[in-house]
Structure formats: C-alpha cells, structure tokens
C-alpha cells in the first residue's frame, strides 16, 4: 500500500513539474505541506488528486494579477472537494496565491481578509511584506476587533516598500491604538484611505496620525472622511499642524465629519490652508458648514489667500440657509483665481432669493471656475432665482460644464426662456445638465437648445 502511494506521489510530482509556471506554486505548497502535515501527505497520494489537479484549469483562477475573495473561494472549493476541512482549504488556497505573488511583479491585490481565526491571519504579514503588491484593499473587515490581525497588518506594512494604494476603509482602527508611526517608516504608499474608522473618537489617534503626516513624504491622496473628527476640539488643531508641515498631500477628503458643529474646526482648517500650498483637491461635503455663518467666514479667508486648491467640494452643507454664507463665499471666489471645479450641489441655494443675487455677481466676475455643480438647489422654484442665474451666465467667460439637474426648471416656462437667452449670449459653455427638471417634451425652447445652440446637454 505504501509503495503504491509513493509511486502515486512521484507520478503527481512529474505532472506538476511539467506543467506551466503557474502550477509551480501548487507544487511548492504541496511539497511544503506534505512535510508538516501527515494527513495532507496521505490525501496527496490518493488517486483522486491526480484527476483533480491534472484536469483543473488553474489558469482561469491564477491567470492575471488581480486576486480577490472569489478566487480564494474557488480554490477553497477545489480543496474542500477532495476531503479537506474549510480551515485547511483556506490555508492551502491562500498559501498557493502567496507563492504566486512572491514570484510576480507589479501585482494588484484585492483581498477580503476578514477572519475570526487567528491562525489564518498569519498570512497577512507574509502577503504584505514578501510580495510586490501595488494595491491592497482590505476595507470593511473590522480589523480593529481583532488585535492579532492588526499586529500582523502593521508588521507587514512596516516591511513593505511596494504598496502604492492602501485601502483600510471601515476597519474600526479607532477602537485601538493603531500604530500610525508605520507611515513614518513606509515611504511607498501614495493613496491612503482611512475612511470610516472612528479615528476622531480618541484624540491620541489623531495626535499619532498627525505626527506621522508631518514626516511622511509619500502620501499624496488622503481620505479621512467619516471619522468623527468633530468629537474633540483638538482633533482639527493637530491635523492643522500636520497640514502646515506636510508638502506632499495633493488630495484631502474630510467629508462627513460634522466640522460645522463647532466653528473652531473651521478656524484650525483655515489656519492650515493659509500656509499649505500643495493640496489641490479638498472635499468638505456634508459637514454642516451652513449651520453657523462664522464657518463660511473662516472658509472665505482661506479661499482669498490660498492659490493651490483647484477642486473644491462644498456639497450637502445647507449653505443657502443664511444669505451671509453666500455673501462670504461669493466675495472670496471672486478673488480666488485657482479653483477650477466647484461643487455646490444640494445646498438649498434657491430658498432665499438674495442668495442668487450674490451668486450672479460671482458668475459675472469669476474667471477660473470651469465646472460648476448646482444640482438640487431649488433654483427653479422662483423665477427670480433663474433670472439672476441667467444674468450671471450671460457674461461668464470660464464655465464650460454646468449641472442644473434636479432644480425644478420645468416648473415655469420663463425659467427655460431665461436659460436659452443666457446660453445664446454665453460663448464658453459646452455642456449643460438639465436632468430631473420635469421639462415638457413639446417645449419649443427645448428644441431651440437641441438644434440651434452648440452645446451638449443631458435632459
């Protein structure tokens, strides 16, 4: 019996050796596991292995450089089908993929590494530290609930020098004292997603992260959205200090942090951007900035001085609730010469007719804004709003893309007349979005837009 098994193993070994390179990792894992796992050695020498491994087209599973949870499950099913437990099949599958990763270059990895079995997570450190991964997505795994997993992750990241894009979204990192110092050591990560991690719940996390950002020279895109940065007043103070000392971050996402609840948050942010001149994209959406006029006062101060921000997202902030918000913003943007893309969607601009008066002045005097998003602002509810908007568009010389979707433009025919008159005089607008405006299909002005005005538009 033993002679037969040994013969079978030699036969299997020859099959694997003759196969293409992609099967080499399989041979390697078999050789490794048979030494440490007698049960596996027993399984490997059974006849059914030959049929499965010889006929299985692993090319379909390991044919490219993208690996995700579906591929692990595919391989798990194969090994479970020949008698292995779910736990062992996971280890075998992950080990095979690890061996392939080690032997490949410029790889993209997209793993779902969630596990409540610490024995499985030991491969996280190996995968991160021993391979040439460029993109690592381990989002939505709640790693903060498993201290051992965090240790393996941190150790791997400290050793890795190839990852460019790291996604740690939704991992409860704020529940523990995450070692943000690793971002002082790692110099390869350029895109870092820390969204939805409760980081602001413990100010020590913000302190450690801020200290790391002061030293880090590689991160260019940083996502800190949904992190309860408003929970402690000093959170933004430390983050402001980091931004004043960092000259490498170009894109910063601070959305969904309720920064408008306390004006001190915007004060510290304003201080940062009075000095920082490298960040080009700033996302402040959904922060309740319209709640207090002083928030827009601080924002306006930084916009008057800063000349690096090109993309500014202020959507979902209820700015229209106070006319003074629009006055401050309009005055600042007439002075600012760097912002090219402005998102003011869902800000209730149309609920106060004075808002659009000051907005008209902005359109008439701004020469830098090329893309303007005014989606869902109730502008069409009052024809005076549309009249003022149209007057601003008539003489504007910079806006090429305008989004007026979901503004009840079709509520009054005069609205469409104002738009048509403005566009006929405007010389730069190239695309207009009028979707979800209840426009009548038989509207003659709509035909005028389609046939005579040389712009692309969505309806």
Image (tube, rainbow, N blue to C red):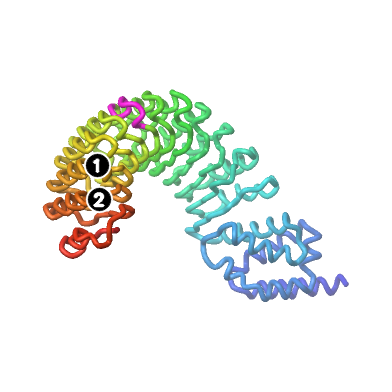
Q: Is residue 442 left or right of residue 316?
A: left
Q: Position of residue 99 (x, y in %)?
A: 61, 59
Foreground residue among 240 and 94: 240
Residue 159 shown left or right of residue 432 in the figure: right
| Along the line of sight, the residue nearer the viewer: 344 or 168 | 344
Q: Earlier in the sequence, mark 1 or mark 2?
A: 1
Quadrant of the rendered image containing residue 354: top left
Do residues under tags 1 and 2 come within 8 Å of each other at their CB atoms?
Answer: no
Q: Which residue is mark 1?
A: 382
User: In the visual, does 358 lie left or right of 57?
Assistant: left
Residue 301 visible at all: no
Q: Nearer the viewer, residue 103 or 171?
A: 171
Residue that numbered label 2 is attached to:
402
| Residue located 67% across and 66% down the image | 27
Residue 413 vertical placement versus 20 (above, below): above
Magenta segment boundaries in residue numbering? 289-297
Does the stretch in magenta take in 291? Answer: yes
Q: Nearer the viewer, mark 1 or mark 2?
A: 1
Q: Position of residue 378 (x, y in %)?
A: 30, 43
> Residue 36 location in percent, x, y?
76, 56
**119 drawn magenta:** no
Q: Label 2's element? A: strand
Residue at 53%, 56% in the rendered image: 109
Q: CA distance from mark 1 to mark 2?
A: 19 Å
Which residue occupies the extreme right position in the image? Answer: 1
Tell me the quarter of the picture where residue 309 sits.
top left
């Amino acid at each position: 019996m033993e002679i037969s098994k040994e013969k079978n193993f030699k036969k299997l070994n020859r099959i694997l050796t003759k196969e293409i390179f992609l099967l080499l990792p399989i041979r390697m894992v078999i050789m490794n596991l048979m030494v440490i796992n007698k049960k596996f050695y027993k399984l490997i020498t059974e006849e059914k292995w030959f049929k499965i491994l010889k006929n299985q087209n692993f090319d379909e599973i390991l044919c490219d450089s993208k690996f995700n949870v579906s591929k692990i499950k595919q391989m798990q099913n194969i090994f479970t089908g020949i008698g292995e437990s779910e736990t062992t099949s996971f280890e075998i599958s992950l080990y095979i993929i690890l061996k392939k990763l080690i032997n490949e270059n410029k790889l993209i990895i997209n793993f779902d590494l969630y596990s409540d079995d610490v024995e499985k997570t030991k491969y996280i450190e190996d995968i991160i530290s021993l391979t040439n991964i460029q993109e690592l997505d381990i989002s939505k795994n709640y790693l903060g609930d498993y201290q051992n997993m965090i240790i393996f992750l941190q150790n791997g990241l400290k050793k890795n020098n190839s990852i460019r894009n790291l996604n740690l979204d939704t991992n409860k990192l704020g529940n523990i004292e995450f070692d943000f110092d690793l971002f002082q050591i790692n110099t390869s990560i350029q895109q870092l997603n820390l969204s939805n991690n409760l980081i602001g719940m413990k100010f020590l996390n913000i302190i450690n992260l801020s200290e790391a950002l002061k030293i880090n020279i590689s991160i260019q895109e940083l996502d800190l959205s949904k992190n309860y940065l408003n929970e402690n007043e000093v959170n933004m103070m430390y983050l402001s200090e980091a931004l004043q000392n960092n000259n490498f971050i170009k894109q910063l996402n601070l959305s969904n942090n309720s920064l408008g609840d306390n004006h001190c948050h915007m004060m510290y942010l304003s201080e940062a951007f009075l000095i920082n001149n490298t960040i080009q994209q700033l996302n402040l959406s959904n922060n309740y900035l319209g709640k207090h006029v002083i928030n827009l006062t601080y924002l306006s101060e930084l916009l008057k001085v800063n000349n690096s921000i090109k993309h500014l997202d202020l959507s979902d902030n209820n700015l229209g609730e106070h006319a003074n918000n629009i006055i401050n913003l309009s005055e600042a943007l007439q002075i600012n010469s760097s912002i090219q893309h402005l998102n003011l969607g869902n800000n209730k601009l149309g609920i106060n007719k004075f808002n659009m008066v000051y907005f008209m002045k902005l359109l008439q005097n701004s020469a830098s804004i090329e893309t303007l998003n005014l989606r869902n602002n109730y502008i069409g509810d009052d024809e005076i709003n549309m009249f003022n908007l149209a007057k601003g568009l008539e003489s504007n010389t910079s806006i090429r893309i305008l989004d007026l979707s979901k503004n009840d433009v079709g509520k009054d025919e005069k609205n469409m007349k104002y738009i048509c008159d403005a566009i006929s005089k405007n010389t730069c607008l190239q695309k207009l979005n009028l979707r979800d405006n209840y426009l009548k299909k038989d509207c003659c002005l709509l035909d005028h837009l389609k046939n005579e005005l040389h712009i692309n538009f969505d309806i």
